[in-house]
Amino acid sequence: MSKRIKKSPAAALAALVLAALALASPAGAERDQAANLIGTFSGDISPARLPRNEAAPVSVQMGGKISTTDRATPPKLAEIVLQINSHGKLQTKGLGRCTLAKLNAFTSAQAKRRCADALIGHGNVTSRVSLPGQGAFASNGVLNAYNGTYKGHTAVLAQVESGQPLPLNYVIVFTVKKTKGTFGSTLTGTLPPIASEYGYITAFHLSLGRRYTYRGKKLSYASASCPAPAGFSQAVFALAKASYLFDDGRVLSSVLERVCKVRG
């Protein structure tokens, strides 16, 4: 006759944590759907090995795709909202600050020269463009993100420059607000009308992170710790919540759960 072995509370907690780790996807892509509209979301943090009780420099990658089940043209994308876990923080002290006036109507190379001390990230944007007499085609754009201000508030200014055959230059303004709860920072990006004048955005990728020195002290625009409980070497955590808001009222969103490991 077999004996039943009783698990201690600590052992039971360990089993739950290990089960959660087994189910978590460290670098997967989540998906949400509303009628024929589909949004996929991706994101990660690097490095994934972090201190338990103090923040260390990181880069945060966020991205996604927009499509439809029936190949119909999706509604215009109005906003991109990125909510970042409260164990991560954004530091702007000592960084340069860029403005819309230094980015609008300038090429990506010109903007980099004008706002080099405010550069905090990079990425890309893909759009589906339709021009009279030319049909539809994919247009790839380079994205550079700058620490800046907008209407007196801290912002991330994401300048997009697309190439031929339809060169465009525009800025997505992400306002930055501190929030309470699971997600400590919210970046709300409003797309300008020109972003959807000739088509619609099908994919984007944004990586935020920069190390710099201010008054002899080494700092990082983005930093984070690993929220693993004492006694555990890793943890599942909600890296971010990403949402797409469209002008017809539909919203697609997903929470990106990832795994971090304790360093040291």
Image: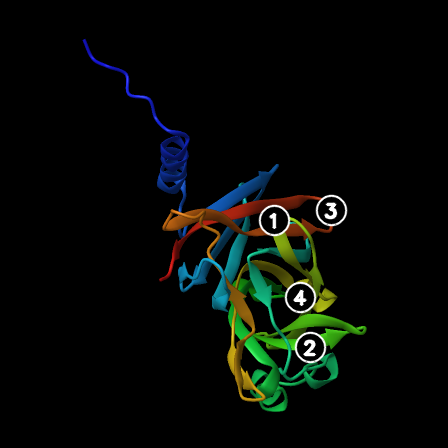
Q: Nearer the viewer, mark 4 or mark 2?
A: 2
Which one is nearer the viewer's eye here, 240 or 10?
Answer: 10
Which one is nearer the viewer's eye here, 220 or 230?
Answer: 230
**Residue marked by disc 4:** 195
**Residue marked by disc 3:** 248
115 is higher (above) or lower (below) than 192: below
**Residue at image point 54% right, 74% down:** 121
Label 1 neighbour load within 10 Å: few <14, some 14-19, many 20+:
some
**Residue marked by disc 2:** 148
- x and y percentages locating residue 91 in the rendered image: 61, 72
Pointers 1 and 4 in contact (C-beta within 8 Å):
no
Q: Secondary structure at mark 3?
A: loop
Q: Residue furthest top?
A: 1
Q: Earlier in the sequence, mark 3 or mark 1?
A: 1
Pointers 4 and 2 in contact (C-beta within 8 Å):
no
- x and y percentages locating residue 95 in the rendered image: 62, 82
Three-letter amino acid code of the residue under disc 4: Ala
Q: Secondary structure at mark 4?
A: helix
| Left or right of residue 181: residue 142 | left
- x and y percentages locating residue 206 in the rendered image: 53, 66
Three-letter amino acid code of the residue under disc 2: Gly
Q: Residue furthest left?
A: 1
Q: Earlier in the sequence, mark 4 or mark 3?
A: 4
Pointers 3 and 1 in contact (C-beta within 8 Å):
no
Label 3 neighbour load within 10 Å: few <14, some 14-19, many 20+:
few
- The Cα atoms of the two marked residues, 2 and 1, are separated by 25 Å
Three-letter amino acid code of the residue under disc 3: Asp
